[in-house]
Amino acid sequence: MTITTAEENYLKAIFKIAEKEGKAVLTNSIAGAMNTAAASVTDMLKRLSDKQLIKYEKYRGVALTEEGSRVATVLIRKHRLWEVFLVDKLGFAWDEVHDLAEQLEHVQGESLVDRLDTFLGHPRFDPHGDPIPDAEGRWVYRQQVRLSVLQPGQRGVVTGVDDHAAPFLQYLDQIGLGLGVELLLTARTAYDQSVQVLIGGRAEVTLSDKVAQNLFVKVS
C-alpha cells in the first residue's frame, strides 16, 4: 500500500492531537493543526479510512487503526532522529531544524533510519526534549511537569518545550533557558499568573503564564 506524503502528515497530526487530548480527534482540531479547511480534512479522512489507516465516524471523531498508529510512530521517529542529527552533527540551532526534519522524515528506507539511529547512539529524546520511539515503536517517557504548576520555592530542570516555533525557542535562548538548565521559581503574580524564576542561580526573569505553560521541567 502506497501512502502519500500528505497522508503521512495527516496521520502524524492525528496521532499528536490524540496524544495531547486523550480522546477521539475532531475534524476541526485536524483542520487547525493542518491549517486547512474542514472540507479538505473530510476528503482526506475518507481516503485514510478507505486505506484502513483510521476509524472515522462523522460527528464522532477519528481514531488511528493499529497500522495508522504504526505509520505515524515511524514518521515521528524519523523526524526526531533527523532533528538530533541536524543539531548534534551539523551544528544547527534547535530553532532551525523543525522544517528541515519535516522534509527529511518522508525519505523512505527502513535501513536508513536504523543506521541513523545507530550512528547517533540510540538517543531517547530529541533537541526539544520530545521522546523518540525505538525501532519497535516503544516510547520512553520521563517524569516532568509544566513550569506553570511549580510553587514558589520549588526548583526544576528544564526537560522540554511544548512549543517548537522558532520565535519561542529564540526567546528562550535570549534569556538563557534551554534543556538541562536549572531554575528556581521565586514568586507568582496572582493577577496574570506570571512567574519570576532564577535561572542557573544567576539571572532572575519574569515569564508569562503562556511561557510557563510551554516549558516542561523535572522537579528537583
Image (tube, rainbow, N blue to C red):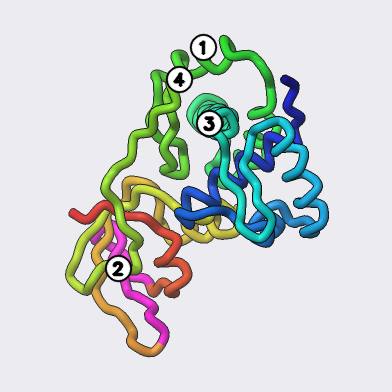
What's the residue at 45%, 67% (across, down)? Answer: 211
Within 10 Å of disc 2 (Cα), the crowding (few <14, some 14-19, many 20+) is few
Query: With respect to residue 113, does 99 lie above or below?
Result: below
| Closer to viewer: mark 2 or mark 4 | 4
Residue 20 visible (yes or no) = yes
Instruction: Give me the C-alpha separation between circle 2 and circle 4.
Output: 34 Å
What x and y, as percent, mark residue 113? 55, 17
What's the residue at 53%, 31% (across, down)? Answer: 66
Q: Amino acid at mark 2?
A: Val
Which sits earlier in the primary sequence, circle 2 or circle 4? 4
Within 10 Å of disc 1 (Cα), the crowding (few <14, some 14-19, many 20+) is few
| Closer to viewer: mark 4 or mark 1 | 4
Under circle 4, the secondary element is: loop
What x and y, as percent, mark residue 196? 32, 74
Query: Residue 66 bears which disc, if any?
Result: 3
Q: Relative to residue 63, is residue 198 drawn left or right?
A: left
Q: Which residues are magenta?
A: 192-205
Which sits earlier in the primary sequence, circle 3 or circle 2? 3
Query: With respect to residue 4, does 160 lie above or below?
Result: below
